[in-house]
Image (spheres, grey):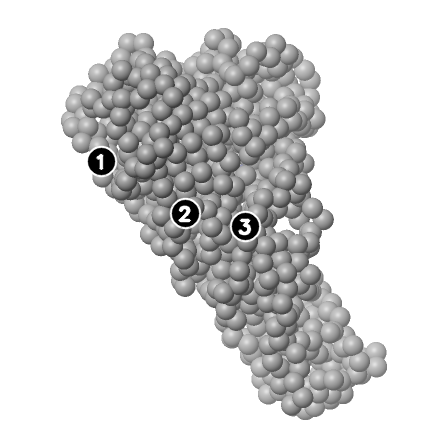
Amino acid sequence: MHFRSSILAAAAVVLISSAARADRSHEYPVRPVPFTAVEVADGFWAPRLETSRETTIPYCFEKCEETDRIANFARAGGLQDGKFEGIYFNDSDLYKIIEGAAYVLTLEKNPKLDAYVDSIIAKIAAAQEDDGYLYTSRTIFLAAKEGEERYHPPGGEPRWSAPGGHELYCVGHLYEAAVAHHKATGKRNLLDVATKNADLICRTFGPDKKENWPPGHQEIEIGLARLYRLTGKQEYLDTAKFFLDARGRAEGRKFGLFGKYSQDHRPVVEQEHAVGHAVRAAYMYAGMADIAALVQDPSYVKAIDRIWNDVVRTKLYVTGGIGAAGGHEGFGDPYDLPNRVAYCETCASIANVYWNHRLFCFTGEGKYIDIMERTLYNALLSGVSLQGNTFFYPNPLETEGRRSRAPWFGCACCPSNISRFIPSMPGYVYAVDEEGDRPTVYVNLYVASDSTLTVQGEKLRMKQATNYPWDGRAAITIDSDTTGNVTLKLRIPGWARGEATPGGLYQFVDIPERFTLSVNGARVESKVSDGYVRIDRTWKKGDRVELTLPMPVQRVIADRAIHEDRGKVALQRGPIVYCIEGVDTEAKSLPGLMIEDDVELTGKFDADLLGGVGTIEGIAQETRWVKGEDGGKTLARLPMAFRAIPYCVWAHRDAEGMAIWLGRTTEGVRPDPLPTIASTSTARASKGDVAALNDQREPRTSGDHANRFLHWWPSKGNLEWVEYKFAAPTKVNAVEVYWFDDTGRGQCRIPESWKLFYRDGEAWKPVARPSEFGCTIDTYNRTTFEPVTTDGLRIEVQSQEGWAGGIHEWKIEGEEK
Ligand SMILES: [Zn+2]
């Protein structure tokens, strides 16, 4: 990345505390045009915005009532009796929904919503302790009388005593909500609560203060930056910066290291790779960008740009989702991007949008908007239904059975984050750079809209007409005269330039036709620089810019380093990534489908499907194993029609299975295997997911979490068993077992020992002359024995002392029918 010379120059300038408001010269060089200035009038976002306003936000408030998230504040404030309900960080959900409601109130007068929010704020204010402390789970806990049933927040009684206690995380969201609410209504009721709390935090935390450690879950850095921008209070900025700088420095630490999980393994400016919990990480990177802008320190930006490169080159899903691993809700190893068990938390997508947008605001480079757009239209939107009242927490790229979004979660971070993100979406369409003598307007997203920008104090009205994301033509009409020369920069998205993602983790098979650009009907030749074409002009009312981005169906392939996507192809049209659901093809199994490069693909628009969406149709090949006359097997192909739909609207119909990645060559298909003795057996076990034993899925290693496995955890050191009952008596002579062992990650290990039995009537008898009972990791352990005709086999497994264990796959050899 290149820095703006102004940032580097300004870094040397001594920072002077401003009296009332944050100093505008210490800000991002590129300033987003606020959502209040952009009136969306399209067929894609406008319904989403309306649903968010009419359904999601009121619905989420209702859920907060139902689940006592609001009552917790009343109880902490002594307005109501009762114990704390829910999870200790539930306060944060309510703050985020208030933030969303504030955005709604910014755009329209809604006395009912306004009054309702005030009624909640009264409870929040009541819950605040005299010195500003606000965290209902601890306040209720400490106020409980002797003998009462009490919810014990983590970490014991003293404040701030739990590293993962989330006190700071929650109030970070409070600050964001308070700033939004004040801007919307002009009221101070929530803002006063926020500043009183922030003053306490600033008195308590700092390099030379009683508490000198960083939060277990980042968010307060962003919140304090917003509060600083509104109030100009220097302590807020200093404390936000302290929270970043305290990370990764064990010296003087109260609780020792939080480690990689909370990005606390190294000082933030020295970090190079995206690690740990993805939402924590991306909130932190967004916070680093804010602080870098406000204190003009490029070292933070250098760090997050290094990390950005790590993510887009090795840890990003084609949907723009981040955080592959469910175990720690976070980043996996480079290129470890499993599809079926992809985590891709909705919150992580929102955080990824925040982070990329901020990097753009530093540099004016389109590559960040490319990633932002990919995440926005795919991984993020998948998190909420078209109806706005059901939600995904993880957003996998492939499923087998039926999946549906849930009405709510015990940990409701995702629905509340959706509540605040969607209403703010119009704020990502435009940006303005007023530095230098020639101001620049960036057109980042193509969204039919009517906008009034402020450029160097002058109003600039712009209309955008487009049917994006289903069509790549956009016309921008200038609706007011300008007096000065204004540069208009139109983003040419990566997908229109043949670049699926910067750095090449994903690539298009074909390069699309070049875009065309005209002003008032006259063709303009312009080369793309940093992802934009530029037009310099003194604009007059009625000037019309027309951009045509050819939008063919595009085939995406992944770097071969992503094992799961080898030999596979994904379909994209415009910014939208498509998927196939079981209901859209007659194929027996989606993993058996193959779309070779010569298959013709047709992009359409179906007004009657899912509220009106683009579709892709074609004839794929379904691959199936068939038994040859010589007993061998061959791969047969059947032509099979399919229709693909946008991934962001999957799981709205009664569909079995979904897949984004499909076979491109035979390497990438996984047709249903032919039946075997094992696969036609009925499996039982002392414990665990027995269907894993004979699903004929090959693990890559013993620790392969992406492959379905049976485990006995948390049962440790015990004698466990698994059994097959054959479909009919069969002569068998060998078995192969692939043990599950997640050393370095979990508590399962290869067994201490095992034995094999066959069924003789009602009795289990040891097989005769077994060759060996191997306990080798990362391979099949084969045991031959004297052939026996039986209707079942049983394995008894002695787990290692202090460890659990499990099995990926158990195969049987014998006379197959
Ligand atoms: Zn979440």
Mark 2 residue type: Trp
What residue is at 69 percent from the left and 17 percent from the top?
Answer: 81
Indicate the quadrant where residue 474 lies: top left
Residue with the mark numbered 3: 603
Above or below residue 129? Residue 715 is: below
Q: Nearer the viewer, mark 3 or mark 2?
A: 3
Residue with the mark numbered 2: 495
Camera-side residue: 716 or 526? 526
Regarding mark 3 in the picture, which secondary structure is present there?
Answer: strand
Q: Residue 472, position in %: x, y?
A: 45, 41
Report whether 76 appears left or right of 675. Answer: left
Residue with the mark numbered 1: 3
Gap between marks 3 and 1 measured at Cα = 40 Å
Q: Quadrant of the C terminus?
A: bottom right
Q: Is residue 629 visible?
A: yes
Regarding mark 2 in the picture, which secondary structure is present there?
Answer: helix
Mark 1 residue type: Phe
What residue is at 59 percent from the left and 63 percent from the top?
Answer: 620
Q: Residues within 10 Å of mark 2 (few under 14, many from 20)?
A: many
Does label 2 or label 1 sit earlier along the sequence?
1
Report whether 655 appears left or right of 269. Answer: right
Q: Are marks 2 and 1 in contact (CB under 8 Å)?
A: no
Query: How many numbered discs sit on the rendered protein?
Result: 3
Q: Nearer the viewer, mark 2 or mark 1?
A: 2
Indicate the quadrant where residue 737 lies: bottom right
